[in-house]
Image (cartoon, rainbow, N blue to C red):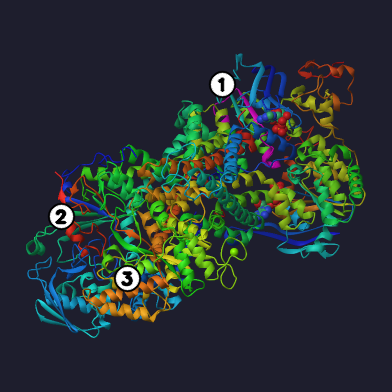
Amino acid sequence: MLRLDGVWKTYRLGAFGTRELTAVRDVSMEVRAGEVVSLIGESGSGKTTIGRMVLGLASPTRGSITFDDVPVGGLRGRALRGYHRQVQGVFQDPFSTFNPVFKADRVFALVRDGFFPSVPAIKWRRRVEAALEGVRLEPADVLDKYPHQLSGGQLQRMLIARALLLDIRLLVADEIISMLDASTRIDVLNLLGDLKTKGLGVLFVTHDLALGTYISDRTVILRAGEVVESGPTDEVFARPQHEYTRNLLAAVPHLHTRWNEPVK
Amino acid sequence: MTDTTEHVSATGAPAPAEPVTPVAGPRRRDVLHFALRNRKVVGGTVVILAFLVLGLVAPFFTDHGPNEYVGPPSSPPSADFWFGTTTFGQDVFLQFANGIRSTFVVGLLGGGLAGLIGMTIGFVAGYRGGLVDELLNMLTNIVLVLPALAVLIILHAYVGITSVPMQALFIGLFSWPWVARAVRAQTFSLRSREFVDLARLSGMRPLAVIRREIAPNMSSYLFMTFILLFGGAVLMAATLDFIGLGPTDVVSLGLMMNSAVHWSALHLGLWWWFVPPGAAITAIVGALYVMNVGLDEVFNPKLREM
Amino acid sequence: MTLQVSDLRVHYRTLRGDVRALDGVSFSVAAGEIMGVVGESGCGKSTLGKSLIRLDNRMKHVGGTVTLDGENLPIADDRAMDRFRFTSVSLIPQYAMSALNPTRRIGRLVADLLAAHGISYAATLPELTRRLALVGLPERVLENYPIELSGGMKQRVVLVLSTLRDPALLVADEVTSALDVSTQRAVAETLVEFRDRGYVRSMLVVTHDISLVYQIADTIMVMYAGRLAEKAPSDVVVTEPLHPYTQLLIGALPEVGARFGDRRLTGIPGRPPGLRNPPQGCRFRARCPLAFDKCAEQPPFVEVAENHQVACWKAGS
Amino acid sequence: MRRYFGRKLAIYALTFVVAVTLNWLIPRFMPGDPVLRMLTRTSVSNPEAIAPMRAYYENVFGLDVPLWKQYLKYWVELFQGNLGVSVWLFPAPVADVIVDAVPYTLALLLPSILLSWWAGNKVGALAARRKWLDNTALPVSYALTATPYMWLGILLAWGLGIVAGLFPVAGGYSFEMRPEWSWAFVGSLAQHWFLPFLSLFLVAFGGWAIGMRNLIIYELEADYANYLAALGAPRRLIRRYAFRNALLPQLTGLALQLGVLVAGALVTEIVFAYPGLGHLILQAIQNQDFFLLQGVFLFIVIGVLAANFLIDIVYVLVDPRTRTGMQGAT
Amino acid sequence: DDGAATSGAGGLPGPGGGGGAYPRNETLYTSGTQWGPPNSWNPIIPGHAMGTVGLAYETLFLFDPQKTELAPWLAEKGEWADKTYTLTLREGVSWGDGKPLTADDVKYTVELGKIKAVPYSNLWTWLSAVDVVDPRTVRFTFTDPRIQEWENWLYENAIVPKHIWESRSEADITTNANEKPVGTGPYEYLTHDQDRMVWKKKADWWATKALSLDVKPTYIVDIVNSSNEVALGLLLQGNMDLSNNFLPGIANLVKGDFKIKTYFPEPPYMLSANTAMLIPNTTKAPMNDVAFRRALAGSIDTKKIVEGVYGNIVRAANPTGLLPVWDQFVDQSVVSQSGFGFDTAKAKKTLADAGYQDTNRDGFVEGKDGKPVKLSLIVPAGWTDWMEAARVISASAQAAGINVVPEFPDAGALDDARTAGTFDLLLNNWAGLSNTPWQYYNYVFQLPIQPQQFAANFARYENKAAWDLVQKLARTPQDAPEFKTTMAELERIHLTELPMIPLWYNGLWAQYNTTHWTNWPSSAGDAPKDLPTTWNNLWEMGSIKMLTQLKPVG
Ligand SMILES: Nc1ncnc2c1ncn2[C@@H]1O[C@H](COP(=O)(O)OP(=O)(O)OP(=O)(O)O)[C@@H](O)[C@H]1O
Ligand SMILES: Nc1ncnc2c1ncn2[C@@H]1O[C@H](COP(=O)(O)OP(=O)(O)OP(=O)(O)O)[C@@H](O)[C@H]1O
Ligand SMILES: [Mg+2]
Ligand SMILES: [Mg+2]
């Protein structure tokens, strides 16, 4: 479904772009339908950049990103809108994904404005309610409220519901749980797990290895923009090949096991 | 380091400082709540409104123009002529009320135009970034270091400023740079907020993103910016009028001071001719600044006094 | 016994009434103990940390006492507290990244601070460099401005600076949250090392990451909505929690290797109550699967086993 | 840092070129012809004399060569310090006229800018920590910064000059005096200088005091201030830090304010009949003396640019944040 | 205004004090001439510092406005013989450097006019030769002896020393600031600064011996005007002795106890200096219609300008516009027959009779073509008294149904409009005091009309007959009986055609403070009658004698 082939991203900085910063180097990977691929790496390793390129919010400097064999980079106007019908994203911080000035359900109105201007209001409302129920939210609880009146978990679920309004096939989830409390995290993860079983492809970006493993089928480990290791999740975690991956895994705090004890 | 400059406005009065705290919905009621209890906001607003009403209403209660010779020359304030008369016997109060009117017009138009240009440039530069940003930034910097009054004087010498709206136009054309800088910085930080990405994922075009997503988040900031621009435009207009570079076919507070000085009011002891116009400018601009600080306290919980 | 907190109540003043961020908290920390304080966001962890060292001007000491080594800490009196700060109680703030004056070289900053406490910088310098070396920083950093250091480096500078006078109690507030896993581990282990070397006697480590705090703490204290829920040695909290809240919290944490398909973890439904008008009785009642009538009454925070205190009617029995 | 300065210099150079070019352009494309002006002044009444005199003055003002040559010549002469000939004060060279007036303007501007900045910041910082001072100094500062320069000037001239008779209200020094190094003369200079200085000082002072007060309040809320307080640092130290840090934006503010202050000085000079650039500029306008106007404008622009650059340098020296990693910023 | 008159700017060393001060009782403080820093002492080009001609350089004759005739000055006498004029220089006149004044200096000065950029270059269109007869005698040979114009030249232009000037190039002569003026006059340059010009009395001046004239002030400090109110302040404080500024409100102060005096103790206080004219552009409709111009002239409430705007320090003009000094030449019968006066009703009737009607009932008449008439009256921005006057003119014209609106463009734009003839109405006063009314009519009627009119006939009124009369006047001596009849004819044409509408006489603004100097010119019986002014071009009308009459106090 989604393919990245030798993708590079270089940011130009400074006066008239005199300095360069390569955020992503030669990354190739694939996300298939019904598959969760987690993208793991420390801060600044280029995860978000990849996510944004996939979403068409940024274009790769080199290499190609294709969705169903159609290059994403060249999409403009109507075609881009068509693409966004199928591919959507949810971001790290639910509080900053909602414009704090407006009520939270504005995100649904925006989808209607952008994609279904002809759907009548009543019908649309029903579809929104259905989508909310799909992410196990009580419509009455979340509609007509301001973002700060809702919990992070509720907000993230609303965003997923928003994506679902569009019959998406691929979801880019960029650290969608790192800002959430431990107890709410798991709800969101479970939701993603459910959607996966319904055939949704998910690019799951995270720096938290414990969470990476919970729902993902395959794992790509990124360091300074480069892929250092990738493969089926179990394999990567059980038998890390790269030194960097091993260090990373060793530093993860485990419940029930102290750092200096062997992992149970 | 650019960001540090945004604390100080072009007028020396404090500009709205610190990153924007967007005002969310129910917090709007909060804002009103605090605004109504903030002495600075209420006091400032009352002063401004009082002058506004005076300027709007007073000219309707007389049947002669502000430049007509209606009374005995050079008479001190009395029941008939509240602020006395000029050496020609013009009613100073009437001129004063009319002058306030043009003061508000200059403030609104000049401040509004400067705000508009500053915001447009700031928004575009901040949102688009890259080369566009570089170029706009350069433009901003150039206009920023050109001393506005000197430029206006030059312009006047060549073009002639003949009406209040034209004066406002020129003032607006040269007082926007600090706004552009500030708005650019704010936009820059808002642009990376994820709701902007979400809007783009919802098929919104850049202009719509700026207008419908970014600008509403800065509304309080923009409002305060406008207040400062208003004050700045009023002062600038008064200065121009005073040195005789303003429109001459209307009555303005600066022009009143100009006439008073020209006709030797200082030496002839006609204090009522030059004290009220300056006092009105000071009061209006001062009230605006005070209001601005009050609003800053309202919008920025950190500054709120408990 | 080093720190003794009894029935501490600290409120935030707001125009809409007080936020009861700490509402009757009693516990003690022994000499040499590292105590982890965990709980959901907004439950009052940072408030607790701040109360022990400096109430900001929106905070109000409503009741309760704090004693350190038997001496009463005048936490409500900002001036009187100065005598204890830095020397007896010290803090690594949540905002360590921005805690250093950006326009002062770090050396100058330390010198200024020491001079203000009447201590010679020159005399302290050898010890300072030794400790910097211990956390892996060269002496050169003293010549740097904060902006020239990375986040992790700043975090470690603050750690060294805060403990320079060997305080009896150190409050470390979310010191690792903003760091990478590997740096996180390094910093956490340094905390333990500082305790081991006696640079600090006892420590209060505030965090929301139970897995992390489990690595370093001797005791873990779980807070919920401005109150204490449970306090026990860390192994006990992780393996045999008694409070239903603790149990659910632990249960919601995925382990590396836990898979969605294998075992479905569950979160805690609902949200914590607001602290402006907290409900009567047990504050977890609304979300608690075990709640019963008696929960309408506030459960006492009592010792149910050695070193194991819980505030739950069900736990004791 | 090299890069930072390079960039700054580039901006200034560009601004300078733009200002100079505008300055050159405008009189050549706007109505109002300096040659005509001269002819009017000489009241050429015999028709035969008009053509030769026109040619003659066009030559004097350098208007008789193609535009591009005029432009190049303008630049060349600019660097030779030649700003052309004044129309109004013909045949005086513009540069001479300006050089004669500048000492007075600088004597007003420099002390009032520096002293008001210094005193305003001090008082603002004090106000931030003393409630009573805050309640008194702040309203006064607001009133001052909202006062139009000329009005304050008029009030001072009227109150202290005319009514109280304490200060003279015209001229650079007593008209009874000849310049020389004597106490009486210096005293006279100071006496004439004081009121215009005071009015500039007061208005600017208000702005700085308010700015500093607000900045200090922000700074005292900053994390580093909280941390220091948590480590038991005395308030004195914290305030010292806050003051120092708050000075930085005030420094940038100073750069931004220069243009406004220069404008204020021009108006104030007019009120007090002080023999600086202000009077020149007004007369140049009234007499359509483009060349003089250009010269004064250019002088002001160069002055403001130079001062800005100076402030930039100082800024870099006092703020480490500009030195690292900030090269991209303006 | 209490306390305004307290003297002394406070604390400074008074008269005679301090090494650098000018002794107060020997110093005359003046202002009203210099509007910018003194920068040129070159008598050949306009814009020279106050007193350059008059105090430093001198003219061959003075013009005595009381007697309306030339008085010998550097010259002893001059005589016409057909087309030649023979001039005899005074004995014993010497330059500041001791060299004697000779006929060569005169010849040199006149021949400077061959340089095109010298303002009097047109002299050489009717002058053919200058010959030195002997060191004290010069003979001028004319192609066209314009007597009036020549007399004008004789007293208006200063003689410069050939021995100093001859080494200068043409360009130098017209662009040199001549910073070290060497003249024949009673004063020499001492110093100057941005805001002042100081002259110092020379040890010996030819007139002391020759005419028993002695200038009294040792120093003249001329203060550069920044504004009139500053002058008023200085005058009130006694820091200025003679102010030639327009000082509104001065009437009140003359009446009060401020030691301030003017030429007349009552209205109009000032002598008259020039005629303020309303100039219609006669190339445009409806100003090209005599009837319309007449109605316009009659609609203006000059009294309101004189009293309201000026507080009576000016006086209404005679309908002919001739200054009071020419009263002897005003033909009263012409005035009573064709003169005009303020009469709104009559103005309305004149309009109606001529066919100007208010057809659209907006209160203003329309043109004969039925289109609305809206005339803008331009006055330079910043000329506050004229701006006020323009407002009064507009109001009174509107009352008569003529829609006149005041506009205040900047001085340069106004110059352009006036020179190019793109205006409707404007105010102008460029015909001032001079030796001959010829100058006035030259100003009114000069032909031919150029695309650009620089000095005269801004109305662009073409009347060949009138212009011929003006030229005739130029060649007629004032004492010839023809002179009077020609004048009467010109007055008649002016009043019936009204190409320019005389409104009021601007004053020869002069106010004195008598604290330190007395015996100022005044209308009082035995007081001096010289022109009390420092304005350039008026020293040679006898103002210089004012300095010889002053008496120091104490
Ligand atoms: N718009 C941009 N312009 C310039 N540089 C950028 C931009 N966006 C990201 N970068 C840089 O690219 C690199 C990769 O950034 P990215 O945000 O993709 O990392 P990340 O892995 O998502 O990190 P984090 O875990 O902190 O979110 C970083 O060094 C970042 O500073
Ligand atoms: N300045 C303040 N004014 C009012 N209420 C406050 C203030 N600071 C904190 N609170 C409230 O006090 C309660 C406890 O806050 P505290 O910061 O101690 O929580 P925390 O447990 O440290 O949370 P986190 O994990 O997010 O840091 C919260 O409900 C919070 O909303
Ligand atoms: Mg990221
Ligand atoms: Mg009509």
Could you tell me which chain the residue with mark 3 belongs to? E
The amino acid pointed to by label 3 is Tyr
For badge 1, the amino acid type reads: Met
Residue D86 in the image, given as x and y percentages of width and height: 35, 66
Q: Work out whether residue E166 or residue B66 is closer to the camera in this orientation and state it.
A: B66
Q: Nearer the viewer, mark 3 or mark 1?
A: 3
Mark 2 touching mark 3, by CB under 8 A? Answer: no
Relative horizontal placement of residue E292, taking residue E196 as reference (left or right): right
Badge 2 sits on which subunit? E
Relative image position of residue E395 (x, y in whole percent): 49, 57
How far is disc 2 from disc 3 in space, using C-alphas?
A: 31 Å
Q: Are marks 2 and 3 on the same chain?
A: yes
**Label 2 environment density (alpha carbons within 10 Å; few <14, some 14–19, many ≥20):** many
Pick the front one: C104 or C183: C104
Instruction: For marks 2 and 3, give the one nearer the viewer.
Output: 3
* Residue under label 2: E549
Quadrant the C terminus of chain D occupies:
bottom right
